[in-house]
Every structure is written in C-alpha cells, then in structure tokens.
Image (spheres, grey):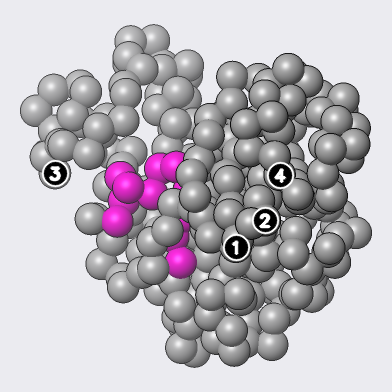
C-alpha cells in the first residue's frame, strides 16, 4: 500500500489530501505549517511520497522534514508536468493553476478544457487538446468581494457566505449575497461564453472550496470536483517520481 500526501497552501487555508494507492482518501485542514504539525501527519499516515503546492510564504523547515521522511516534490515552474506552458513568463504561473490543468488533462486526455478554480481568487485556466496551457484570467474571489464591500464602505457589514438567498434581496445581508454570488455566477457564465466564441468544443471543470455556492446558479454544463487540485498534485507527484 502506497500513501501520498498532497499539500495545498493557499491564501486562505493550508490543506492536505491523503491518497492511498492512487485513490483520494481524505482531506485535512491544517492549523499551521509547523514541523510538529507535519510530523504528526507523517506519523499518522506513513507516506511514501509528498508534494507541496504553495502560493504563500510557508515554513521552509517543513520541506526539509518531508525530504527526510518521504520522496518529496515541491511544485514550481521547473517541475516536470504533462503539459507545456507557452506563456510569457512560466515562472509566474501559480502552482495551484498548474495542478488544476494537470488534473484536467489527466481526467480528460485529448480534450480542450477550461478549468475554473474558486478560492481566494477566481482563476480561469485554458488547456487545449495538445496539452498546451494557453493561460487564462484572474479575478477576485467570493470572500475577497465580501470583505471589500465592508472595507471600502462606511456602513456595509461583512457577510458570511450562504447559498440560501433570493434574487431580489430584502435586507442588506441578502442584497450582498445576491449581488456577490449571483454576480460571480453571471461572470463565470459570461467568461465561458467568451471562450466559446474563440475555442471549439471544450469541457468546463469547476473546483475550489467555494464551488458549492455556484454550481446551482451556472447555466453551463460543468464537471464539478472540489478536490480537483489534489488530483492534479497527485498526478504531478507520480510524474516526478
């Protein structure tokens, strides 16, 4: 039995997924990136491999610990991946975006794919059937929009995300929920339509911690998987062993 730990350190949370014999087993949200936290995961799961995708300034000591105890790989622009990146500055591509497009080509080989990641930011990532990561776009995520309404106005409150709201809000809270969540859903539909005007016949994949708030509001047929980034990380880990 082979176990792989896939670490995803985003702007909001630090998380880890456990894969056993190539199959996703569970997700763990980490309190921090201390050596004690990482060591407890190693002691619990006895991993053979590990991989890290990080877009933050994480604790470098955790990398050394993972190198000592596992076959460790840190995902960056120098990693071997089963896609090409014909963009101007490949070193600026977020590790999370690389993992998403690798997941897409692994799940849907020989297809064009638009992968939408819903986290601290919304990322649009287009990879064609030739496994060329063309690029995409970045816009503010749901939590960022909620916080900006509070931070840049005098009286609007910080609203917590909730899927249950009407089209026409009846108070400040439901007005903000409708404006942010439905506004984002219409943005996503509009971006998909713009890609449809330029590219033919592609899959739309939706992932990220906020995806559950939007699937019911999107008019396009999508493939939704909240663990897509982990599946990309696992594929990259296997590719680099």
Residue that numbered label 1 is attached to: 22
Residue that numbered label 2 is attached to: 2
Q: Nearer the viewer, mark 3 or mark 4?
A: 4
Q: Quadrant of the N terminus?
A: bottom right
Q: Residue furthest top?
A: 154
Residue that numbered label 3 is attached to: 167
Upstream in the sequence, badge 3 or badge 2? 2
Q: Residues within 10 Å of mark 1 (few under 14, many from 20)?
A: some
Using the numbered discs, state the Cα–Cα distance from disc 4 to disc 1 in whole angstroms: 12 Å
Secondary structure beneath dot 3 equals loop
Asked whether, in this view, residue 230 is left or right of residue 78, the answer is: left
Residue 1 in the image: above or below residue 39: below
Instruction: Please report contact status of discs 2 and 1: CB closer than 8 Å, yes or no.
Output: yes
Residue 72 is a magenta residue? no
Using the numbered discs, state the Cα–Cα distance from disc 2 to disc 4 in whole angstroms: 7 Å
| Residue 56, percent from left and from top | 74, 32
The span picked out in magenta is: 205-215
| Residue 143, percent from left and from top | 44, 31
| Residue 42, percent from left and from top | 71, 33
Using the numbered discs, state the Cα–Cα distance from disc 3 to disc 4 in whole angstroms: 47 Å
Secondary structure beneath dot 2 equals loop
In the picture, the disc for residue 47 is: 4
Upstream in the sequence, badge 3 or badge 4? 4
Upstream in the sequence, badge 3 or badge 1? 1
Asked whether, in this view, residue 108 is left or right of residue 188, the answer is: right
């Amino acid at each position: 039995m082979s176990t792989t730990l896939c670490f995803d350190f985003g702007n909001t949370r630090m998380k880890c997924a456990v894969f056993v014999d190539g199959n996703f087993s569970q997700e763990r949200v980490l309190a921090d990136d201390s050596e004690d936290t990482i060591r407890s995961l190693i002691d619990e799961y006895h991993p053979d491999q590990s991989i890290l995708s990080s877009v933050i300034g994480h604790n470098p000591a955790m990398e050394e610990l993972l190198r000592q105890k596992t076959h460790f790989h840190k995902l960056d622009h120098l990693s071997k991946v089963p896609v090409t990146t014909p963009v101007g500055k490949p070193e600026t591509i977020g590790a999370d975006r690389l993992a998403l497009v690798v997941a897409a080509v692994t799940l849907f080989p020989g297809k064009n794919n638009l992968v939408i990641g819903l986290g601290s930011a919304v990322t649009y990532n287009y990879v064609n059937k030739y496994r060329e990561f063309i690029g995409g776009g970045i816009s503010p995520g749901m939590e960022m929009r909620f916080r900006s309404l509070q931070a840049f106005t005098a009286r609007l409150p910080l609203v917590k995300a909730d899927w249950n709201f009407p089209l026409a809000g009846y108070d400040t809270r439901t007005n903000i929920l409708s404006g942010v969540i439905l506004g984002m859903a219409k943005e996503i539909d509009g971006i998909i339509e713009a890609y449809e005007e330029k590219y033919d016949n592609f899959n739309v994949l939706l992932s990220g911690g906020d995806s559950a708030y939007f699937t019911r509001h999107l008019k396009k047929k999508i493939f939704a998987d909240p663990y897509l980034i982990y599946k990309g990380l696992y594929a990259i880990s296997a590719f680099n062993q």
